[in-house]
Amino acid sequence: MERARRRFEERVCLVTGGTSGIGKATATLFGLEGARVSVVGHDEEDGRHALDDLRSQGIEAIYANADVADEHEAQAAIVRTLDEWGRIDVLVNNAAMMTFAPVVDLPTADWDRVLAVNLRGAFLFSKFAVPRMSPGSSIVNVSSVHAHETTVGVAPYAASKAGLEALTRALSRELVDHGIRVNSIAPGSVDTPMLWENPNVKSGKEKVEGAIGKPEDIAAAILFLASDEARFINGTTLVADGGRLDIL
């Protein structure tokens, strides 16, 4: 009996922030759907663990160590992927960080760093990947419900995610004639280290109310947005929050 063709067979997917949480779940799901996966992270040890796990499931994967906000390192990660497989079909801009301080107390360097990782990183990877992406390819940017409603002390994170959604809309228009779709997804509370290491959550200052998603829930939505089934979806943000915005 002939094996059913998996949805991303022979395609290449690059995931930034791919060594843990949503990024790791996304890399895994694409791999299980037949993709060859390039995982980008900033910690070599985490990268080795991610590769071991992916390969143990029969997934073809490589790791590229990069500060996503560094132009040369971002370009090198793209080149590493192209050298290995010669193409990029899906780019998932997932790498992100947060700070927890009011604007008046926030060091300027912290503001700059959050915007650099969360927004500049997506710009850089898109800039260098797009020229090597073919018609039918897709970019998915991982935003947040904080782009729409937010809480105290995370202004640079909220600003960066709102900017990421604006970048999504603008880039989707630029790439229409290239046949490349660009969408974003805005997760709510997800069971990842970023949620539980939030000092406001640890202290009880911020209550995690409503449904808490699993990284696999967001990965499934990312995979859908990148798939041929979503070919009529472009320039939009899919909110995947279990009703979190209704609470905020």
Image: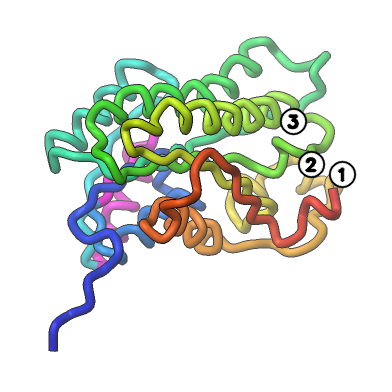
Three-letter amino acid code at the position of disc 3 = Val
Question: Can you identify the residue that label 1 sits on?
Answer: 205
Q: Earlier in the sequence, mark 3 or mark 2?
A: 3
Q: What segment carries the magenta color?
A: 37-57
Residue 137 spot, x, y in % from top left:
31, 43
Q: Nearer the viewer, residue 11 or 24?
A: 11
Residue 1 sits in quarter: bottom left
Identified at 43% across, 25% down, the residue is 174
Q: Residue 194, located in which quarter of the rendered image?
A: top right
Taking 65 as reference, is 102 above or below it? Answer: above
Q: Residue at x 36, y 22 (%)?
A: 127
Q: CA distance from mark 2 to mark 1?
A: 5 Å
Question: Which of the numbered marks, if any, corresponds to residue 116?
Answer: none
Residue at which label 3 appears? 154
Question: Viewer-proximal residue, 56 or 176?
Answer: 176
Say what amino acid the circle numbered 2 marks.
Answer: Asn
User: Is residue 70 toward the left or the right of residue 81 in the image?
Assistant: right
Instruction: Name which of mark 2 and mark 1 comes first in the sequence.
Output: 2
User: x and y percent of residue 109 in the render?
Assistant: 62, 12
Residue 205 spot, x, y in % from top left: 87, 44
Say whether residue 7 is left or right of residue 60: right
Q: Secondary structure at mark 1?
A: loop
Q: Is the Cβ of the residue at disc 2 closer than 8 Å to that at disc 1?
A: yes
